[in-house]
């Protein structure tokens, strides 16, 4: 009797967890099917990007630690992304689509990744340095200038040299 | 019954992995005096093998990162002289500094800019002095940003904490 009850509880728990996982949902399924393009990490100064994202800036916010994960959606067409760091954490992880643009104010040949959030957040623009390095652009599509401690760059995880 | 246990364990493991989060931390910024008429770039970079070798830094010393100040006195072509300070050492937790203030290297020499020498015709700045194992090559992304190049003029790749980028202090 006890054995049957335990078995029942385990199955019920399993169903509940699976249901919860599927509810958080499509994303999980998508993640399994999506092809990873790259994970990029970096630390940037806080204030300018926080302001750009319409988030409250406090004096305590000196820097932001970012993790951007890009998934391919098709050859040369961008795809989907997740963005972690700053206010984007736990149940607020940033998600959306990224597309590829060409040209900035100072470099007509530059490759630019545009990140459009699923939520009503402003787009982010990153210039591709090469396959391993991305640079943040401001609203005028200029490269952003950091300080002595932090720069506006993201580095592909796992290829540091 | 054993398959149920296996399923249960797998589900628990998945829950544990999914609960990981980014850990924030705070730090104190450092000031920097700006002597004119030098053009000044500054930044903090990793201390990877290539950079350590270029600066002739000892291999057995723990170096978490390097804080750079680059002073350029150049004509319109970008050629001229440079002074460089590289402060390095083991990072002091919860600060942007080093244990015991770190160790500072100071060098000076000649700088040259070769235009249209990198992909997309971007210029490369070369810092030359006998004090280095080899010249420091910096990609001029624009007037405000310089990026360290490695062997074969590839962009050096940083990590989650630091990038190989120098930022102009007196922005143009």
Image: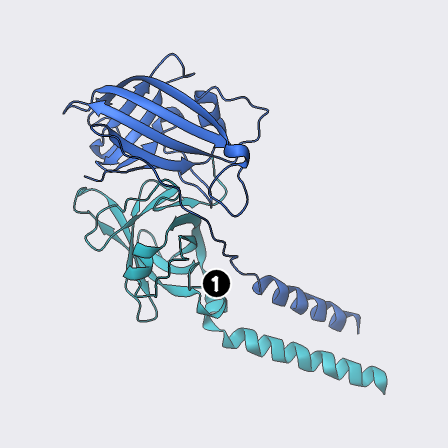
Quarter of the rendering occupied by the N terminus of chain A? bottom right
- Residue B164 seen: no
Please name the color used to draw chain B.
blue
- The residue lying furthest to the left in this view is B76
The number of numbered discs placed on residues in the rendered structure image is 1
Residue A76: where, in percent of width, then height? 31, 51
Q: What residue lies at 35% left-to-right and 31% top-to-bottom?
A: B69
Q: Is residue A31 left or right of residue B143?
A: right
Residue wearing tag 1: A31
Chain identifier of the cyan chain: A
- The residue lying furthest to the top in this view is B130
Residue A25, compared with residue A116, is above or below; it is below
Residue A58: where, in percent of width, then height? 37, 61
Q: What residue lies at 20% left-to-right and 28% top-to-bottom?
A: B37
Q: Secondary structure at mark 1?
A: helix
- The residue lying furthest to the bottom in this view is A1
């Amino acid at each position: 009797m006890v054995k049957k009850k335990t078995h029942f509880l385990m199955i019920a728990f399993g169903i509940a967890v699976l249901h919860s996982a599927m509810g958080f949902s499509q994303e999980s399924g998508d993640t399994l099917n999506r092809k990873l393009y790259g994970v990029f990490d970096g630390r940037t100064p806080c204030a300018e990007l926080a302001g750009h994202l319409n988030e409250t800036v406090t004096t305590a916010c000196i820097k932001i630690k970012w993790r951007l994960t890009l998934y391919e959606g098709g050859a040369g067409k961008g795809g989907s992304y997740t963005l972690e760091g700053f206010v984007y954490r736990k149940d607020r992880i940033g998600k959306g689509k990224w597309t590829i643009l060409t040209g900035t104010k100072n470099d007509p040949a530059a490759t630019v990744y545009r990140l459009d959030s699923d939520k009503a957040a402003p787009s982010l623009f990153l210039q591709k340095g090469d396959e391993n390095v991305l640079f943040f652009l401001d609203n005028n599509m200029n490269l952003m200038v950091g300080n002595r401690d932090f720069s506006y760059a993201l580095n592909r995880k796992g290829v540091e040299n | 019954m054993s398959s149920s246990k296996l399923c249960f364990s797998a589900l628990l493991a998945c829950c544990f992995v999914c609960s990981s989060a980014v850990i924030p931390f705070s730090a104190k910024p450092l000031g920097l005096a700006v002597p004119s008429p030098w053009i000044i770039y500054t930044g903090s970079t990793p201390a990877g093998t290539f950079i350590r070798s270029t600066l002739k830094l000892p291999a057995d010393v723990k170096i978490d990162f390097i804080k750079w100040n680059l002073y350029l006195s150049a004509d319109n072509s970008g050629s001229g002289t440079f002074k460089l300070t590289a402060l390095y050492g083991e990072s002091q937790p919860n600060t942007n500094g080093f244990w015991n203030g770190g160790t500072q290297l100071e060098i000076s020499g000649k700088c040259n800019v070769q235009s249209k020498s990198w992909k997309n015709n971007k210029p490369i700045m070369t810092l030359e002095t006998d004090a280095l194992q080899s010249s420091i090559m910096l990609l001029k992304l624009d007037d405000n940003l310089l990026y360290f190049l490695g062997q074969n003029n590839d962009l050096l790749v940083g990590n989650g904490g630091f990038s190989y980028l120098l930022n102009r202090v007196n922005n143009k």
